Amino acid sequence: MNQDRNDPDTRTGSLLGHGVEDSGLRSVEAAGSGNRFDYITFLTDYGLEDEFVGVCRGVIYAIAPHVRIIDICHMVSPYAVRSAALMLVRAIQYMPPAVHLAIVDPGVGTARRAIAVETADAVFVGPDNGILSPAAQMLGGALRAVEIVSEQFRLPQRGGLTFAGRDVFAPAAAALARSASLDDLGPEVPLESLVPMVVPLPRIERDKIECEVLWVDRFGNCEVNVSPEELASIGAELGKDVKIGVAGSEWIAVWAKAYGDVEAGSVAILEDHYGLLSIAVAEGNAAGKLGLEEGVAVTLRR
């Protein structure tokens, strides 16, 4: 009996007929030459409004049901590769040995490579756009890397090329957690060919530092690419005023140890929990008050 192409059962079948069951991934026996990981960390710009994160988690559990997934963040600004790379490197030192899955992928569907990168105690999976580089370096540097091309460790291609998280990266991460080796995923690539992530350095002069905002947290605190030692090198002192220049405007901040060292609503600059300086407003929002966002140029003067 022929079904009508508009029959709901027919249309539903066309949407759901290419999942993990059909891929054979669930029954794949890993080569066993790799390490088995109990954790997969997961970082994306997918947000939480759509099903993207849940689908990737489902793919992972279908292939590697033993793992526990640590969601680092899924609210990275869309396409913000540098922000994601910095978020991953901030978090990585507090993670257990794991497969680290990071997906912020403006080049999805293009010639950009899908890669897996091995370090001493971890494996990173994601696009070759620099997102993995700082964190891999934090863990002692990449030992080797492969391009993920093996059809055995991908979901069957259906539709367009817009969801590599589901079709490529999540299956690869799960397979690695099950003790597949990097060699199972594809050919080795030269480490020097991997796309680096360039983090800007501050320009330090006798009485000023030209820097930029690296990160704005949900409280509006703005981390800049300057250490306390670099601020002290221009003669600034803890407990004293520091001038903050932003787009032609100037603000007076106190170099403080804690938010509570200044009055509510006052601007402060202090060492954050990652060892860099952060511009803050006590019980307020520095990004909103000073007009700051990631990548904005800032000048610090004593």
Image (tube, grey):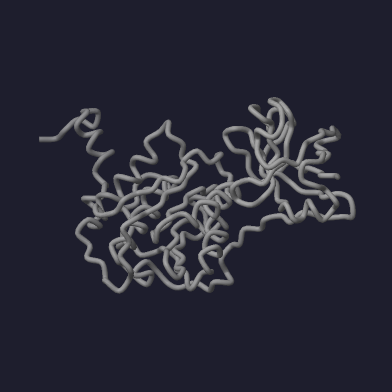
Residue 106: percent from the left, percent from the top?
54, 47
Image quarter where the N terminus lies is top left
- In the depicted structure, whether residue 191 falls above or below residue 43: below
Residue 286 picture quarter: top right
Residue under the image location 22 percent in, 65 percent down = 29
Which residue is situated farthest in the right direction here?
206
- In the depicted structure, whether residue 52 falls above or below residue 92: above
Residue 233 or 209: which is nearer the viewer?
Answer: 233
Residue 6: percent from the left, percent from the top?
24, 28
Residue 168 or 48: which is nearer the viewer?
Answer: 48
Image quarter where the C terminus lies is top right
Residue 300: percent from the left, percent from the top?
81, 44
- In the rendered structure, the answer to whether residue 3 lies left or right of residue 127 reads left
Residue 97: percent from the left, percent from the top?
39, 61
Residue under the image location 70 percent in, 39 percent down = 279
Residue 260 picture quarter: top right
Residue 113 or 222: which is nearer the viewer?
Answer: 222
Residue 17 picture quarter: top left
Total number of numbered discs in the rendering: 0
- In the depicted structure, whether residue 86 falls above or below residue 75: below
Residue under the image location 33 percent in, 45 percent down = 57
- In the rendered structure, the answer to whether residue 171 lies left or right of residue 240 reads left
Residue under the image location 29 percent in, 54 percent down = 67
